[in-house]
Image (cartoon, helix red, strand yellow):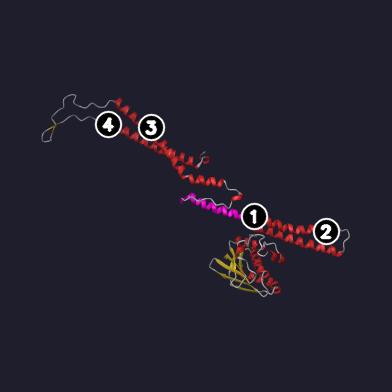
Amino acid sequence: MLKKMPIRLRLTVMTVALLTVCCVGLTLILNLSANRMATRIDASLVVPAKKVAEDGSVDESFQSPAGSMVAPVSSEDSEQARMDYRIESIIYMLLVIVGGGLLTYYISGKALKPLNTLNGQVKNINVRNLSKSLSVPSTNDEIAELTVTFNEMMYKLDNAFMMQGRFSASAAHELRTPLAVLQTKVDLFKKRKDHTNEEYDALISVIEKQTNRLRGLVGNLLDMTNMDDNCEESSIYVKDIFEDIISELSHMAKDKNVTLSLDCDSSIVTGNTDLLYRAFYNLVENGIKYNMDGGSVGVIVNRLSKEQVSIRIIDTGIGIAGENKQNTFEPFYRVDKSRSRQIGGAGLGLSIVDTIIKKHNGTITVTDNENGGTCFNVILKI
């Protein structure tokens, strides 16, 4: 019953209940005490009159005349006084309870006014005004703290909705492009009845290329959603991972005229070998893809503390502008769209890297290289 009441009414009911218990208890105690005192007074004997001499001594031989003793109060008057006392105490008790309840209701209304204001503002929030912050009360109480926390939550929700919108639009665009190419080629092919072997080969080549693109895109999307399936963890020598990666990408680096280097200590991290291999492979591969002719990609690994390992992948490539750094790890986001199209990829690589690092309770940030290019900073727990 109380759970369905408004806070103000609930607080009032609880206060009235507390006042009732206290007042009833106090009234009972006072009535019992008053009854005891009245009974003792009624039962006490009246002391006879004494004759006092001029020097202040009492004459014990003096006897007061008959009738000189004070008459005791009648039992009817005593009972009436007791009854009046009980009635008055009950009336005062009820007045205290009612007055306390009304005062509590009024004061609680004043105290909960900022909460009612906050409730009204929250009711007006919808998908279109998530970015609008609520006004924070000037009082430094829990309601003001709740408002600040709510504003922070709305900011995160707004960013999440915007990211979801960009993700949906980008995913639809990425899926639509190869499908449109396939549809166009098939329509053109169907307009003619006779085709040469070269035309068949060209059509098959286009279908194969666009099918592989769709398969890679869908595979990346599935990898992002099924990342938790690879939950097997073990102790991993970071140096072993990067030695394998550099060995595998050496031919690609040679074709791009990019130098690879590794400066790694004997740090060990706990995680999934396949996932970490894929994350660092993507970072090194991007460093080679977007590098300059004659550039370099360096990997530096060192232990920061007993619990953390620092991994930096530094390249001398095209770099990332400051306004683009905060969106670098969003799905389908490309810093240079025209160049990304030429090189290939759907813009999911860094998003997958970010997901893998976060799965391992690590952090990844991107900064500028002093000599031009980009530096990816990864912090993993040992």
Check disc 1 and report the residue beneath it. 164
Helix, strand or loop at disc 3? helix
Which is in the foreground here, disc 4 or disc 2?
A: 2
Check disc 3 and report the residue beneath it. 91
**Image height of 122 relative to 77, above or below:** below
What's the amino acid at mark 2? Leu
The label number, if any, that marks residue 41 in the structure image: 4
Residue visible at 72% across and 61% down in the picture? 216
Which is in the foreground here, disc 2 or disc 3?
A: 2
Magenta stretch holds residue 159: yes
Q: Is residue 233 visible?
A: no
Check disc 2 and report the residue beneath it. 188
Relative image position of residue 322 (x, y in whole percent): 60, 65
What's the amino acid at mark 3? Ile
Taking depth in this image into account, of 337 and 57 the one nearest to the observer is 337
Q: Is residue 82 left or right of residue 216?
A: left
Instruction: Tell me which label, 1 or 3, sits earlier in the chain.
Output: 3
**Image height of 66 relative to 16, above or below:** above
Q: Is residue 187 left or right of residue 264?
A: right
Residue visible at 52% across and 47% down in the picture? 118
Cβ atoms at labels 4 and 2 below 8 Å apart? no
Q: Residues within 10 Å of mark 4 (few under 14, many from 20)?
A: some
Helix, strand or loop at disc 1? helix
Relative image position of residue 276 (x, y in whole percent): 63, 65
Q: How many marks?
A: 4
Helix, strand or loop at disc 4? helix
Q: Is residue 22 left or right of residue 325?
A: left
Instruction: Tell me which label, 4 or 3, sits earlier in the chain.
Output: 4
Which is in the foreground here, disc 4 or disc 3?
A: 3
Q: Main secondary structure of the magenta part?
A: helix
Residues under labels 4 and 2: Cα distance?
A: 120 Å
Magenta stretch holds residue 299: no
